[in-house]
Image: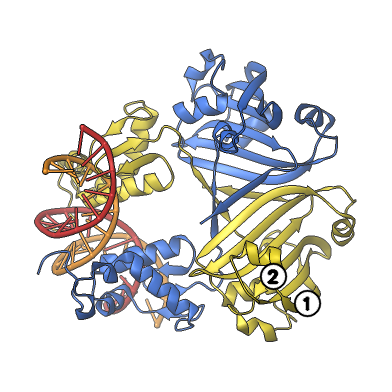
Chain colours: A blue, B yellow, C red, D orange
DNA sequence: GAGTGGTCTAGACCACTGA
DNA sequence: CAGTGGTCTAGACCACTCA
């Protein structure tokens, strides 16, 4: 018997019947059809592998991915059970503002309102888990779609972690894009909220003071070293959507 | 040689050195240290496996997970390259409102403002990819933290997909929790935005008309069958945070 | 202590796609 | 059409945890 050949009779000539995707779907079906109820313990990997006529690793991958999205909960020794409270994770695509604007068919433009290098203020040090004296680059930018203000960005960058950015003038590439291109990260914290536009916000974004703004804050790290913190304000008509 | 024993000399007695986690970290390190630059093609799985002294599957898992979070991009035949625009995904935990409130040390309470069964309005059918005559349950609920309004929820439920909910009175369990417990889903769409409180919103949430509200909309499906659509409004001081 | 999931190895076939 | 990633098999050791 060859390696990839299915073992179960009903699967003859139909690889897909024992693929990890098929197993995921079948498990979802059993949950939907109440064969397995929330909170219920389901058979172990070994048993399922025997039932599906596949290797245990294949069942493992299916269950691992279902656990990742919160459909089942797995514990050693305790086994796998259908999640009672599927505290699911939503995945949000983090857009590059230029790409986002251009995807709407609008013309993208940005402007750097201010640029200064200074010691990190206490609040920023706390937010980034930094201590001691830290030089940071503080930038304030406005992004436009067809010359209409689209997003106001207030960013702090840890120069110790991203030294190359100190010489950048951002004539053609926005700080956002420069960082995306040159400073990959492995960890991130995001916070979403709504706030009322201050007089300055309103002036910059071309809206009225007190109008609702969508706030997107993001902090990133690479291997425990903080890179940047950014606060982005969007006009009231902005929607962040994700389907998966 | 036993199955799990590492092959590389430096790994003797240190399994972890060739684990998929180690490989992920090492790849991130190389990106950080500019050994591999954005856009660059990195060695194939086979080569890396040889270099790290591990099986190709192990490298595969490391790279697959890095691709999942957008650090690298993979294509058959073309190989794996460091992402130029790491359009990363943010992961947001979707909270059960009761759990969220109780986590703050506050007392949770909810109230069903209205409950009606009716044919789906056109807008809702479109949103849920439904056609024809569809019976839906429409619910409006208010959630409290220590008797202070916390969230206003406007929900539509597809009775064909979740028939058992028709008899529910929601005396003790909120619709939110009932669904979480009884109607697992496999697909979801979320939309985040900010809006100004209408007079009714303001009245319900105990804030002023025009105050900024954080809006969280969610639609869920199980195996292509739409389950529910919900629009949740939060008071201006609400923040949705996630770190990973 | 024993059972379950977590992970690794070695080898293989296959699908896709870019040179 | 050849090379790369995608995935599967079979077998194994190990870590954690619960009874």
Query: Disc 2, disc 1: CB below 8 Å?
Result: no
The answer, for residue B37, to whether it is visible in the render is yes
Left or right for A209, reference B158:
right
Q: Up-down: is A168 above or below A87?
A: above
**Which chain letter goes with mark 2?**
B
Secondary element at image label 2: strand
At x 60%, y 50%, the residue is A241
- Alpha carbon separation for disc pair 2 and 1: 10 Å
Q: Which residue is mark 1?
A: B115
Crowding at mark 2 (Cα within 10 Å: few <14, some 14-19, many 20+)? many
Residue A235 in the image, given as x and y percentages of width and height: 73, 38
Locate the N terminus of chain A by quadrant.
bottom left
Q: How many marks?
A: 2
The answer, for residue A78, to whether it is visible in the render is no
Return the mark for residue B220.
none
Q: Quarter of the image holding residue A136?
A: top right
Residue B23 in the image, given as x and y percentages of width and height: 30, 43
At x 68%, y 65%, the residue is B124
Looking at this view, is A163 or A108 the one in front? A108
Looking at this view, is B138 or A120 the one in front? B138
Q: Which residue is mark 2?
A: B156
């Amino acid at each position: 018997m060859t390696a990839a050949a299915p073992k179960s009779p009903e699967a003859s000539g139909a690889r897909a019947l024992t693929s990890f995707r098929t197993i995921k779907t079948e498990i979802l079906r059993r949950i939907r059809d109440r064969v397995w109820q929330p909170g219920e313990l389901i058979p172990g990997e070994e048993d399922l592998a025997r039932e599906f006529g596949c290797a245990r690793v294949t069942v493992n991958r299916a269950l691992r991915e279902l656990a990742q999205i919160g459909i089942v909960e797995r514990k050693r020794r305790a086994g796998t059970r259908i999640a009672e409270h599927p505290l699911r994770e939503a995945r949000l695509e983090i857009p590059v503002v230029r790409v986002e604007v251009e995807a709407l068919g609008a013309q993208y433009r940005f402007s750097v309102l201010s640029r200064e290098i200074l010691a990190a203020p206490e609040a920023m040090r706390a937010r980034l888990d930094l201590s001691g004296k830290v030089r940071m680059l503080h930038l304030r930018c406005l992004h436009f779609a067809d010359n209409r203000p689209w997003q106001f960005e207030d960013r702090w960058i840890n120069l110790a972690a991203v030294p190359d950015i100190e010489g950048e003038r951002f004539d053609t590439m926005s700080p956002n894009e420069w960082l995306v291109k040159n400073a990959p990260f492995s960890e991130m914290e995001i916070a979403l909220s709504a706030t009322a536009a201050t007089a300055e916000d309103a002036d910059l974004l071309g809206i009225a003071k007190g109008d609702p703004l969508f706030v997107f804050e993001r902090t990133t790290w690479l291997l425990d070293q903080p890179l940047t913190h950014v606060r982005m304000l969007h006009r009231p008509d902005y929607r962040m959507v994700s389907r998966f």
